[in-house]
Amino acid sequence: MKNFAAAGGLALALAVGMTTVADAQERVRWRVHSAYAQAMPIAGPTAWNIAEDVETLTDGNFDIRVFEPGAIVAGTQYYDAVSEGAVDAAYGSPGFNVGKNSAYAFFAAVPFGPGAGEMLAWLRHGGGLELAQEFYARDNIHMLPCGILPPESGGWFRKEIKTLEDLRGIKMRFLGLGAKVMEEFGVSTQLLAPGEVYQALELGTLDGAEQSVPSIDRGLGFYQIAKFNYFPGWHQQSTVQELLINKDSWDKLSDSQKRTVELTCESALVQQFADGEAGQYEIMQQNEADGVATMEWPQDMLDAFRTAWEKVLDAETGANADSARVWESLAAFRENYKVWGERAYLK
C-alpha cells in the first residue's frame, strides 16, 4: 500500500506539475487575415486549416481566428496591417506585395521559372528563404512559405487570341512579373483580388484574366464568361503562398509554438500541391462540357513571351538592387540544378 500510495503521489505530483507548466504558458490569441475566401478551392481553406491544426497541436493553447477578405482589410492589401500589428498575421502570396518591393514577385512565381520542386529546393536550400525573410524583416514582418500551387493556366479570354497583335489593347487581371511581360505586348494589366475578377469580366472592364489553376478559376466562375482558356501557364509554373506574421507577435511565441506554426505551414505546402495536381483534369473536362475551348499557346508566341521576359528581367534587376540579389541567387541555383533536373526527369 505504501508503494502504491507513493506511486500515486508521484503521479499526482507529475500531473500537478504538468498542469502548472501548462497554466504558466500564456494562451496565445491571433487575428489572421486571409486574402482568399474560405470557399475558394484549394488555397481558400488553407488559413482555416492552419488555425485548426495549430489549436489541435497546442491543446487549445494557441487560438487563431481567421477573417475573410474585407472583414478587416481588403483582400490583397494586408502588408501594412501585418507590419503595424493591426492583425497578427495574413495569408496570401508574395506577388500581392510588389507595391512595397517589386523583388517580392520573385518569391511568388517567375516566368519560365521553376516548378514546385525546384522552387521549394531554392527556397529551402538555395538561399531564397533567407533573402525573403531579410526583406520582410525591414518592415517588422516574419515570412513563412505556407503553400505552393502547380502550374496555372495561361489565362482566360473572352475572345480567341491568335496572334500577338490580338493582345494589344486588351485589359487583363495579371499577377507579378508575368504582368510586366504582357505589358510589353500592349496589354493593360491590373491586380485584382480573386473575388473581384468575375464581376470585372462580367461587366467588361476586363477582357481576360489569369488567376490560378483551373479548379480555382472554375470556382471563381471564369468559365461562364471567358470561353478561351490557354495553356501552358508560362508565367507561373508554380506559385508560392505565404504566411506573413507581425514580428512582435512572432517573437512573443515560445520555441514550441513557433515550431508548431512552421510545421503547419509545411503541411499546407504538401496538401496544396497534391490537391492542385489531383484536381485539374476533371475540372478541365467540365469546362469543355460547358463550352470552354482549351487552347495551347503557339510556339512562336511562347518564344516572344520568353524574349520579352528577358527584357523585363534586365529592367527589373537594373532598377531594384533587391531584385538583382534575388535573381543572382535563383539563377545560380537553377544553373546548378540543371545537372540534376535535365537528366533526372523525362522530357
Image (cartoon, rainbow, N blue to C red):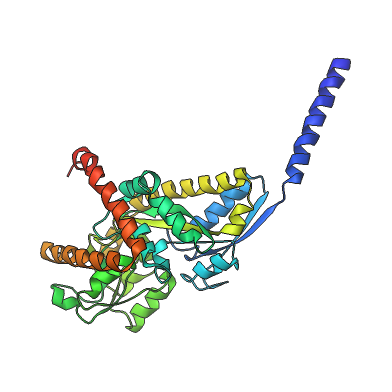
| x then y, percent, for residue 230 | 23, 65
Camera-nearest residue between 17 and 287: 17
Q: Residue furthest right?
A: 2
Q: Is residue 111 left or right of residue 125?
A: left
Which quarter of the rendered picture does the C terminus lie within?
A: top left
Camera-nearest residue between 236 and 176: 176
* Residue found 61% across the figure and 53% down from its top: 251
Q: Residue furthest left?
A: 300
Among the 4 quarters of the image, the one containing residue 201: bottom left
Residue 335 seen in the current view: yes
* Residue found 50% across the figure and 67% down from its top: 79
Which quarter of the rendered picture does the N terminus lie within?
A: top right
| x then y, percent, for residue 344 | 22, 38
Residue 44 seen in the current view: no
* Residue found 22% across the figure and 82% down from its top: 169
| x then y, percent, for residue 244 | 50, 59
| x then y, percent, for residue 17 | 78, 35
Q: Is residue 205 above or below residue 320?
A: below
Q: Is residue 182 left or right of residue 88?
A: left
Among the 4 quarters of the image, the one containing residue 225: bottom left
Numbered marks: total = 0
